[in-house]
Amino acid sequence: MALPIKDELEIIKENENIEIELLLNAIFMKFGYDFRNYGKAHIKRRILHRKMVSGMNSISEMTHKMLYDPLFYQEILQDLSITVTEMFRDPSFYLSLRSEIAPLLKTYPFLKIWHAGCATGEEVYSMAILLKEEGLLKRTQIYATDFNQLALQKARAGIYPIDRIKEFTQNYQKSGGKSSFSDYYNARYDSVILNESLRENVVFADHNLVTDSVFGEMNMIICRNVMIYFDKELQNKVIKLFHDSLVPGGFLCLGSKESLRFAESSPRFESTFDKEKIYRKKFTV
Ligand SMILES: C[S@@+](CC[C@H](N)C(=O)[O-])C[C@H]1O[C@@H](n2cnc3c(N)ncnc32)[C@H](O)[C@@H]1O
């Protein structure tokens, strides 16, 4: 029987997919970063973009260069890790935290909060400001993690371009901020430096959600706009990791486009504020 004839475009796409799989395997084997269960469309878009800007002829050529050129590997790693973020991103989420969750947190003697995939730290400082205004910061230990070393360096420094301050200030006000946002930073030339006191109880650390293990006994985990890049299987694995890292009754906060609705661990959580993607680990399963 004659095999169906594939058109040229189909063959190119098929070969591209094979080459992408080989590239991802090479990254995992050589550097230990595992992107094999990230969303295929996202990975393909980013790799084809790097191929275009670096003027390479094929993805296989990129794989070879990446294995022998550490700088090129770093470029690919940055491509595969989208670090777009902002302070008080989705202000209504922070408003709910402040008005609905903070009163409960005030009944706890000590709090542990994990920001997983904190990127350049804006989310972490937003939380520190909220906790400070609610009188909770001193009794809270915050763990802020990401697998992107460059992003973590920026997060530790807490220095942001001054031209983003207008947007951050508007978000802060919409999120129910109780003070003036300018109380929390000092401006220097074209940057602002966030107050040192905001990071006193923050530990910034390298942690890979795909390959590293649980962080114990958390009262709250914030992992927003990270799992959106994962396929279903990896999402299930990471949600289980979060379940295992939370105390019973602990909160899990996801991004606006993420949900637990179809996750395997979904029955182990209750939906506290569905609209803001705030879930709570059940006390008994
Ligand atoms: C779009 S940013 C989200 C930042 C912040 N959470 C927010 O919502 O604004 C996604 C972050 O997830 C991090 N990330 C992606 N995969 C990761 C993994 N496997 N382990 C840890 N962090 C990861 C990226 O490096 C990036 O900093």
Image (cartoon, helix red, strand yellow):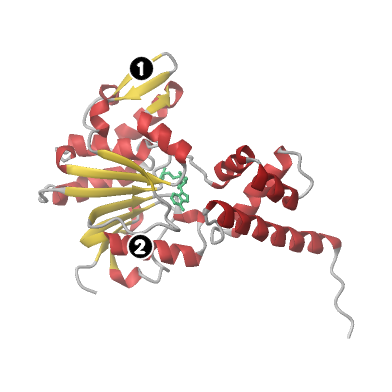
Question: Which of the two labelled residues, at mark 1 and mark 2, occupies the earlier sequence position?
Answer: 1
Q: Secondary structure at mark 2?
A: helix
Q: Which amino acid does the dot numbered 2 rest on?
A: Leu
- Which residue is found at the position 45% from the left and 58% from the top? 210
- In the rendered image, which residue does mark 1 sit on? 187
Could you tell me if residue 271 is visible in this image? no
Expressed as whole percent of the image width and height from the top left, the position of residue 141 reads 22, 44
Note whether 280 is above or below 110 in the view shown: below
User: How many marks can you see?
Assistant: 2
Residue at 25% over, 32% down: 198
Instruction: Tell me the residue at 37%/36% (across/down).
Output: 122
Quote the CA–CA distance across marks 1 and 2: 39 Å
Q: According to the image, label 2 marks what residue?
A: 241
Q: Nearer the viewer, residue 178 or 13?
A: 13
Please provide percent x and percent y for residue 89.
Answer: 38, 40
**Residue 82 visible in this rendered orientation of the protein:** yes
Residue labelled 2 has its Cβ within 8 Å of some atom of ligand 1: no
